[in-house]
Image (cartoon, coloured by chain):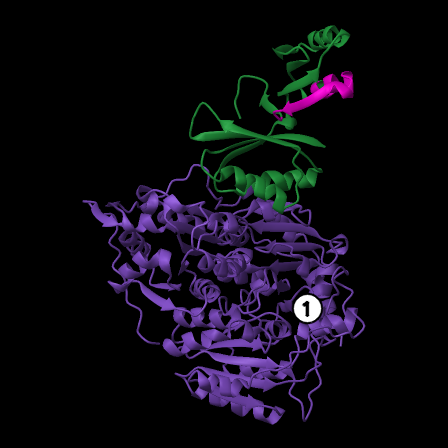
Amino acid sequence: MAAPHETLDRPGPQPHPEEMTGAEIVVRALRDEGVELVFGYPGGAVLYIYDELDKQEAVRHILVRHEQAAVHAADAYARASGRVGVALVTSGPGATNAVTGIATAYMDSIPLVIITGQVPVALIGNDAFQEVDTVGITRPCTKHNFLVRDIRDLASTIRKAFFIAASGRPGPVLVDIPKDVTAKRCTYQYSEKVHLRSYRPTVRGHSGQVRKALQLIASAERPLFYTGGGIVLANASEDLVRMVRHFGAPVTNTLMGLGAYPASDRQFVGMLGMHGTYEANMAVQHCDVLVALGARFDDRVTGNLSHFAPHARIVHVDVDPSSISKNVKVDIPIVGDLRSVLAEMNEVVLESGMRCDPAALERWWAQIGEWRARHCLHYEMDENVIKPQFVVQKLHELTGGGAIVTSDVGQHQMWAAQFYGFDRPRRWINSGGLGTMGFGLPAAMGAQMAEPDSTVVCITGEGSIQMNIQELSTCAQYRLPVKIACLNNHYLGMVRQWQEFFYENRYAMSYVDALPDFVRLAEAYGHVGLRAERPSEVEPVIREALRLKDRTVFMDFHVDRTENVYPMVPAGAALSDMILV
Amino acid sequence: MRHIISVLLENEAGALSRVAGLFSARGYNIEAMTVAPTHDLSVSRMTILTQGSEEIMEQVLKQLNKLVEVIRVHDLTEGPHIERELMLVKVHAVGADREEVKRLSDIFRGRIIDVTDRSYTIELTGTGEKLDAFLHALDPGMVIEVVRSGASAIGRGAKGI
């Protein structure tokens, strides 16, 4: 790390409001929100803000090489730390480049504040240089957005943006600031409280519903907990573990929820969904009570909706009422913050001593044991060819399971999810909702900034890594010791897999030709590049990468080109219709 | 089923496009949409005429409520309510037709608000059904132009939404 994080004295409300420029207000408001890091890229419309950032040290700015990466890095910083991530970009192309990052954060409900420059108020709507309708473009992919036309609204708008981003169901909030607004002067007052008459998220769950839900769970013979990213976002992992252990029921996590329940625990049956385990998907299809916590019944989770969990009565706890009964009709809905609701559930359980019938549970676990015996994640080792799953398992082993793992999108993402075995929340950072290739490397930078002392591994593929490869330069500038593990199979592997299964082996455009020499490319950026071509080279390469604690290391693993991700539920099939190895 | 939804929202730039964008992005049907400030100038009231199954309507209401600038959402079709729409119709009116159009307009309690030697412009308020019926009663060849406001609606009784 280039410099340790400074701790902040939050000035709080001042008795005598000071007069400042708009740019000073922006920087001061960030300080008052406790922001330590901003990821961004300068340009004409934000020059006053950059000028102010440069005059102080409390808010540190990280210069990326592409605005998309600024937003991904801020996003991963938020995911790893639980705080609001901040990105700063200029107008026009700065804002449009940021859109993929914003949409990624929106789909995964990540709290971000994105500040975009805009052309001066008088030029808005005139097709001015570097002008786009940023609030128009980002309206469908932000939780909310603002255009600040009047400097008197600037401080309160930034305050509102942070409040909206972090409360309720979190999400990205964009503040578009015209250049002339950052140059004008106005008094600054930081308001401690935000009042929005039209925005009041529900925190506490309905107590009657909580009791009904617990009675239903206790009456179950085949209960199953199905938990998602909401547990991670609400920091409710400990409360979840307490409840699941109390009932002694199996638990499955979504892709976004991995780590919320320890993967090494006996009650964990693995991830569910399209590439979920056999036992998790079978448990969904056979359970009689399904307890969905902070999960949204995404199509990659449910498979064919009309065949989803056919025998189950469903409890659903979510902070967002619109997630409830959106895809699957729910029997007991509870709207509320998961930490608050689970704490209340645990309290009621403790005082009432409700339990499931032990004999029924025993039968249920025996059935799950039979499903587990299929060893659905099994793969055959090969003496000469590296299996991608083996690389992930070795990464887990040699990092002691304690790394923060970011990923891109595709086969490597699924293998990382299946084989890394996350025991803690906020250690698995991936683009689950939008599925954004190019997320992994900038995300690793943001995570490393949030946790300078943790090992951060970016598991990627040769397709995804090239979508934001320029960030190797950012890693060099800030000496970010991220470890890139590229599962290089010379194919857009997931595309290739679908073409093999569903398009009669016609591999249209999925072969990645003309690949760079990644080792030399890493070296050109001043990093260390390592290559493994045989299974015996995997462990030495990982050990060497981990030994180089303060270096960015690119590990290029030449893996089996035609390996597939199993199990697989074809799109539109029932969860029980899995393709197994 | 047909629903009339009243939405109270902050009277701010962009609020209308948030609602319109929500309907198009999620593929909800909009038959008509009207919006104007209320007696409190900081609040606009929007009336949306839409169609959809019970499940879709539940989502429409939840998604509208989720918009940060939306203060209150109410499905007026859940209870007794009054619905009115304004229509202006310009028709050819020459010879015997002039008397016929006048008579028809009276039957529907319309008012003729502009007259030339070849045309009448009629103002008519009522439910959408009544306006449809009036148009139906006219000879289609006579109609020059039709402007409809979209429905406005309010709940019956002493209480507001």
Q: Quadrant of residue A413?
A: bottom right
The correct choice, above or below, for B16 with respect to A70 in the image is above
Chain letter of the green region: B
* In this rendering, position of residue B8 left or right of residue A114: right
- Taking the spot 58% from the left edge, 85% from the top edge, the residue there is A557
- Give the magenta range: B131-150
Residue density around tag 1, few if under 14, some if 14–19, many if 20 or more, within 10 Å: many
Q: Is residue A63 visible?
A: yes
A92 and A310: which is toward the camera: A92
What percent of the width, then of the height, locates residue A554? 50, 83
Question: How many marks are shown on the rendered structure?
Answer: 1
The correct choice, above or below, for A538 with respect to B18 in the image is below
Name the chain under label 1.
A
* In this rendering, position of residue B159 left or right of residue A192: right
Write down the residue under mark 1. Answer: A275
Q: Is residue A264 visible?
A: no
* In this rendering, position of residue A224 left or right of residue A429: right
- Taking the spot 49% from the left edge, 81% from the top edge, the residue there is A399
Asked if residue A446 lies in the magenta stretch, the reply is: no
- Taking the spot 52% from the left edge, 42% from the top edge, the residue there is B67
The extreme left residue here reads A16
